[in-house]
Image (spheres, grey):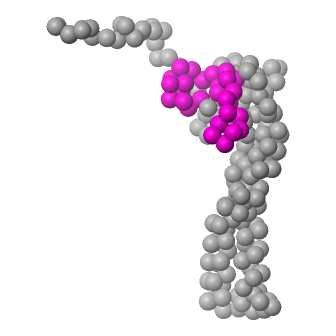
Amino acid sequence: MNTNALNRVCARPVLICWILGALVADSIALTVPSNGVRLISIASDMQGWLFLILAVIGAAGLGFYVGMFTCWFWVRPLCCKLNGAPFKIGNHAVIMVGPLRGTVAEVEDITKGQGGQDVVWLDLGPERRKKFSNIFEEYSLMKVKKGEQGGPPNSRPPSQSPSSPEVRSPDSLRTSFPGGCG
C-alpha cells in the first residue's frame, strides 16, 4: 500500500479550498486598504501592525467561504480522481483520514449522498453498519490494488473484533417476565 503526499493532501479537499480562498481573501485584504500607500508605511507602527494582523486573520476566516464557493466544484472531483475514484463494489480501499486511518476494507455498496456525489460504504463490521459509521466520501479513500494490500481485505481495527467467539442471537437476549408476553 503506497500512499504519497499528494494522496494524503487530496484526502482533505475542504482544507485545500480553504487555503486557496484564504490566499485570495488575504491578498485582497492587504491590497484594498493601502489605497496607494505601501504596506511598509502602514506597518511602521504598532497600530498599523495590529490592523494588518486583524485584517489577515479575518480575511483567512472568510477565505473558507470564498474557497468553498469558488474552488469546491473542481477541487473535489480532482481529488477523488487522484485517489482512485470511481469505486466499484468489491474494490479494496484504504481510509486516508480520521480515526480509522490506514484501515483497508472492501467496498460493499455505493450510494448517492445529500449533495448528489457518490458515497462509499465499506465492510467494517456489523457494529459500524448499525451506527452508519462505515460511510465515506470518495476523496477520503484511496483505491488499493489487490497485490498492494497491507493486511487482509477486511482488516478491522482491534475495537471492532468480537470479544468472544460466542455469538448471541436476539432471541437469546430476551428475558421472560412472569405474566408478560415474552
Residue 122 image position (x, y, % from top left) = 65, 25
- The C terminus, quarter of image: top left
Residue at 56% of width from left, 32% of height from top?
A: 133
Q: Is 70 located above or below residue 97 in the figure?
A: below
Residue 170 falls in image quadrant: top left
Q: Inspect this view and state whether residue 157 appears.
A: yes
Residue at 71% of width from left, 34% of height from top?
A: 118
- The N terminus, quarter of image: top right
Residue 92 falls in image quadrant: top right
How many numbered badges does the structure rendering display? 0
Q: Nearer the viewer, residue 101 or 24?
A: 24
Q: Is 27 located above or below residue 34 in the figure?
A: above
Residue 9 image position (x, y, % from top left) = 76, 47
Residue 156 image position (x, y, % from top left) = 60, 23
Q: Inspect this view and state whether residue 40 appears.
A: no
Residue at 58% of width from left, 26% of height from top?
A: 157
Instruction: Residue 128: say if magenta.
Output: yes
Horizontal arrangement in the rendering, residue 167 relative to residue 119 (left or right):
left
Residues in magenta, as a range = 107-134
Residue at 76% of width from left, 59% of height from top?
A: 70
Q: Residue furthest left?
A: 179
Residue 29 falls in image quadrant: bottom right
Instruction: Residue 5: say if magenta.
Output: no
Q: Is 16 located above or below residue 112 in the figure?
A: below
Residue 54 image position (x, y, % from top left) = 62, 78
